[in-house]
């Protein structure tokens, strides 16, 4: 059973998926079980992780307003980040499966990237909603004591589909 917050997360994810695909009414009955699985999986990750979510449009608004925040791309450097990333994003790769422990080197690298300010706004993203690299990083940032941690579920795919500008490594 989902908590009240979990239920709201499921509804928000459903709205996000609906808006992202533009097929809310047209998809009635078409692969709804897959949409439900994705939404519930995501909601449960958010509950376990203890972080918040930010939509593509909300993140773009924050970027445009030059809000103080750290944006972290969790995709592999050469396969993704180098080719395109959200403007200003820093990169630190993390595996897809949820991790129960961190080794000392990984913990040190994450803490170095995130910095000493535990109240700073940090947004993690990966490739798309089903990719859990951003979940892993956001969850670990919360475990390390950071308090303003967000996950951008649509990732670089949603950012690109919205036709927002990207940066590349030259």
Image (spheres, grey):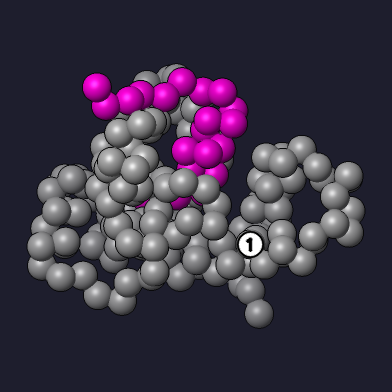
Is residue 102 visible in the rendered structure shown here? yes
Magenta-colored stretch includes residue 47 = no
In the picture, the quarter occupied by the N terminus is bottom right
Q: In which image quadrant can residue 132 be found?
A: bottom left
Task: Please determine whether, in this image, residue 119 is positioned above or below residue 60.
Answer: below
Asked if residue 69 shows in the view, the reply is no
Which residue bears the numbered disc 1? 38
Q: Which residues are magenta?
A: 148-170
Up the image or down, 80 lies above or below 143; here it is above
Viewport quadrant of the C terminus: top left
Residue plotted at (45% across, 70% down): 48
Q: Position of residue 54 (x, y in %)?
A: 51, 43
Q: Residue at x 85, y 57 (%)?
A: 30
Q: How many residues crowd around disc 1 within 10 Å: few (fewer than 14), some, or many (20 or more)? A: some
Q: Which residue is drawn at the image coordinates 80% and 42% (left, top)? A: 23
Q: To which quarter of the image does residue 40 belong?
A: bottom right
Q: Residue at x 48, y 43 (%)?
A: 155
Judge from the rendering whether residue 14 lies leftward or rightward of residue 62; answer left or right.
right
Q: Could you say where residue 157 lies in the image, as x and y percent from the top left?
A: 53, 39
Front residue of 86/3: it is 86
On the picture, is 40 further left or further right than 67?
A: right
Above or below residue 148? Residue 137 is below
């Amino acid at each position: 059973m989902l908590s009240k917050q979990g239920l709201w997360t499921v509804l928000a994810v459903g709205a996000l998926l609906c808006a992202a695909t533009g097929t809310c009414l047209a998809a009635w009955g078409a692969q709804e079980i897959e949409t439900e699985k994705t939404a519930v999986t995501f909601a449960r990750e958010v509950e376990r992780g203890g972080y918040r979510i930010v939509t593509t449009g909300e993140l773009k608004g924050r970027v445009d307003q030059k809000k103080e925040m750290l944006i972290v791309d969790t995709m592999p450097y050469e396969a993704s980040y180098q080719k395109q990333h959200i403007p200003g994003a820093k990169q630190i790769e993390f595996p897809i499966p949820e991790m129960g422990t961190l080794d000392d080197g990984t913990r040190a690298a994450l803490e170095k990237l995130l910095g000493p300010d535990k109240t700073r706004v940090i947004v993690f993203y990966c490739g798309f909603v089903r990719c859990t690299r951003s979940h892993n990083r956001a969850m670990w940032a919360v475990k390390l004591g950071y308090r303003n941690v967000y996950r951008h579920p649509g990732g670089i795919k949603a950012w690109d589909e919205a036709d927002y500008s990207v940066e590349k490594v030259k």
